[in-house]
Amino acid sequence: MKFKADLTDTVGRLKLIEIEFTGKIKITDCELRQIITKELPGWRLLSWWV
């Protein structure tokens, strides 16, 4: 599964990232938020799409 996401940080900067998961067919919004919190401290998810 490959998708893109918009992130923002505490000062309002925006970042567009592309993420690819192998072996996973579906991911929930909550799971993605947890991954971003763990892997990219200080950033939070705004939106994501395939």
Image (spheres, grey):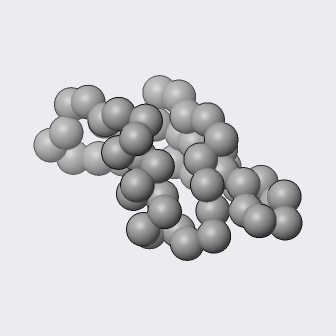
If the image is split into quadrants, where does the N terminus sit? top left
Where is 2 relative to 11, above or below? above
In the image, farthest residue toward the bottom:
41
Q: Nearer the viewer, residue 31 or 2?
A: 31
Q: Residue at x 44, y 69 (%)?
A: 39
The picture quadrant where one finds residue 6 is top right
Q: Position of residue 18 (x, y in %)?
A: 51, 48
Is 28 on the left or on the right of 41, as rendered? Answer: left
Residue 6 seen: yes
Where is 50 relative to 46, above or below? above
- Number of labels in the image equals 0
Q: Position of residue 10 (x, y in %)?
A: 77, 65
The picture quadrant where one finds residue 9 is bottom right
Q: Position of residue 29 (x, y in %)?
A: 43, 36
In the image, farthest residue toward the left:
23
The picture quadrant where one finds residue 41 is bottom right
Residue 19 seen: no
Where is 27 relative to 10, above or below? above
Q: Residue at x 55, y 34 (%)?
A: 48
Q: Nearer the viewer, residue 32 or 2?
A: 32
Q: Residue at x 40, y 41 (%)?
A: 30
Q: Residue at x 82, y 60 (%)?
A: 13
